Image (spheres, grey):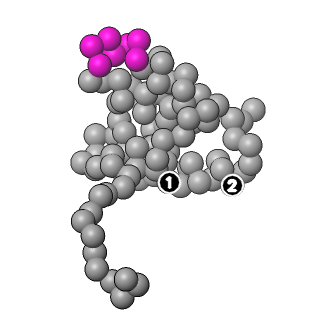
């Protein structure tokens, strides 16, 4: 049984968000592994990290909360990536007025 509502959703998870070795071997064997990886990474800075890992996992479970792509792809991977999904910039003049 799959947690995904559509085959394409599982394919996107596999291609973009599933943690894999450099040779393509999956580290996250299930989407539950991905949710656990994200929850553990987000809870790491909390005083009671085990409690918050469970709270974050429950939010992620069954896609009730879906973080931005950079967080889903990068949290808990040990890759040197930003988890910010948007950047605030000053006003950039253009011809639109």
- Mark 2, other Cα within 10 Å: few <14 / some 14–19 / many ≥20: few
Q: Is residue 1 above or below residue 67?
A: above
Q: Secondary structure at mark 2?
A: helix
Q: Secondary structure at mark 1?
A: helix
Residue at (40% x, 17% y) in the render:
52
Q: Which residue is mark 1?
A: 16
Q: CA distance from mark 2 to mark 1?
A: 12 Å
Q: Which residue is mark 2?
A: 8
> Residue 53 placed where, x, y %?
42, 20
Residue at (32% x, 11% y) in the render:
48
Which residue is at the front of the view, 81 or 90? Answer: 90
Q: Is residue 76 left or right of residue 27?
A: left
Quarter of the image that includes the N terminus: top right
* Magenta span of residues: 46-52
Q: Quadrant of residue 4?
A: top right
> Residue 5 placed where, x, y %?
74, 43
Quarter of the image that includes the C terminus: bottom left
Q: What residue occupies the far bottom of the structure in this picture?
A: 95
Residue at (33% x, 46% y) in the render:
83
Residue at (63% x, 53% y) in the render:
11
In contact (CB < 8 Å): disc 2 and disc 1 = no
Which residue is at the front of the view, 18 or 49? Answer: 49
On whether residue 37 falls in the magenta region, the answer is no
Q: Is residue 72 above or below residue 33?
A: below
> Residue 35 placed where, x, y %?
50, 32
Of callouts 2 and 1, the N-terminal one: 2
Q: Is residue 56 above or below residue 86?
A: above
Asked whether residue 33 appears in the rendered view, the answer is: no
Asked whether residue 84 appears in the rendered view, the answer is: yes
- Mark 1, other Cα within 10 Å: few <14 / some 14–19 / many ≥20: few
On whether residue 48 falls in the magenta region, the answer is yes
């Amino acid at each position: 049984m799959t947690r995904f509502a559509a085959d394409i959703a599982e394919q996107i998870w596999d291609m973009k968000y599933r943690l894999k070795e450099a040779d393509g071997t999956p580290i996250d064997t299930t989407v539950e592994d991905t949710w656990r990886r994200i929850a553990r990474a987000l809870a790491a800075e909390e005083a009671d990290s085990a409690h918050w890992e469970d709270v974050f996992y429950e939010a992620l479970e069954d896609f009730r909360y879906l973080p931005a792509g950079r967080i889903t792809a990068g949290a808990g991977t040990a890759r040197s990536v930003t988890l910010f999904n948007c950047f605030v910039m000053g006003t950039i003049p253009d011809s639109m007025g």
